[in-house]
Image (cartoon, grey):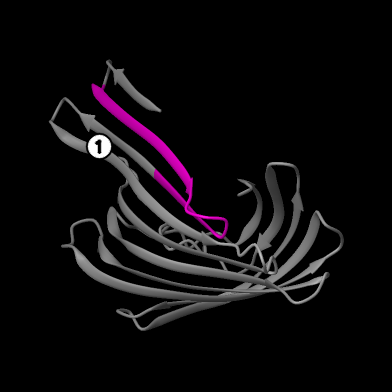
Amino acid sequence: RIEQREDRGQQNMDTYLVDLDIKGRINDDFTIIGSIDLGESENLDNDTLAARNNRFDLSLAYRPVLSDRLNLISKYSWVDYKQPDNQLGDIGFERHKGHVLATDVLYDLSTQWRLGAKLAARYGEEKMPELPWAKTARWLGATRLGYRFNADATLFVEYRMLKDLQADDQQEGSVIELVRRFEKIEVGIGFNHAGFSDDLGIMDYTEQRGYLRITGVLQ
């Protein structure tokens, strides 16, 4: 999907959007998934970048046919984000960009109990208003335990921890989520008590709230 929008009025803006997805099966056990989301807004009045939201994801999923208890997904992400003019995020960043590596593993201990873990690292740069770019490094660790009520419904309890290596700061907390799987989608309803996302491509530390999640199911 490719879009272009031209706004003419009090402000003259051009906006470009690109959204591409790809999925391929290497063999019965391995699947590769990729996505590119590019978005930029240019202020024509002063010839400056008004906003940017660029992201590239490349994932490798391992689901062995002979051992369907194991699910493993590794993902690389590149992000480059600029807050819209005259707006600042909840943590005050004007811009941020970086590289993220993450691995998720989920193992079925039995027909009812599931055990999972996630490890992720982000290295990049961030910019606050009126300040120069600063290098940053963060890592995240999480463990989750799931109880399956039936083939389509599972309750997960997760503990996650986020470490900022530059600031020597640490946050931690729990997440509880009830997941219901339908034919081609998965719906999760939960509460994030940790206050941050487990996706290090998202710089938001204000997620201490309930949420609704809808995702596609990898077949």
Q: Residue sitting at 55 percent across and 77 percent down?
A: 172
Q: Which one is nearer the viewer's eye here, 64 or 119?
A: 64
Residue 84 horizontal/vertical position (percent):
32, 41
Q: Is residue 172 above or below residue 35?
A: below
Q: What residue is pinned by disc 1? A: 50
The answer to whether residue 77 is left or right of residue 85 is right
Counting other residues with Cα less than 10 Å from the Cα at mark 1, is it few (<14), some (14-19), or many (20 or more)? Answer: some
Q: Image quarter for residue 177?
A: bottom right
Q: Is residue 55 above or below residue 172?
A: above
Q: Residue sitting at 69 percent across and 48 percent down?
A: 186
Residue 114 horizontal/vertical position (percent):
73, 72
The answer to whether residue 104 is left or right of residue 120 is right
Q: Which one is nearer the viewer's eye here, 112 or 65?
A: 65
Residue 53 horizontal/vertical position (percent):
34, 44
Q: Residue sitting at 37 percent across and 74 percent down?
A: 138
Q: Report the magenta stretch's main SS.
A: strand
Identity of the residue furthest to the right in this view? 149
Tell me which amino acid carries mark 1: Ala
Q: Residue sitting at 25 percent across and 37 percent down?
A: 50
Residue 199 horizontal/vertical position (percent):
48, 61
Q: Is residue 26 inside the magenta stretch?
A: yes
Q: Which one is nearer the viewer's eye here, 22 or 78?
A: 22
Q: Is residue 85 visible?
A: no
Q: Which residues are magenta?
A: 11-35
The secondary structure type at the circle numbered 1 is strand
Q: Image quarter for residue 45?
A: top left
Q: Is residue 116 inside the magenta stretch?
A: no
Tell me the quarter of the image containing the N terminus: top left
Q: Is residue 32 visible?
A: yes
Q: Is residue 11 above or below residue 205?
A: above
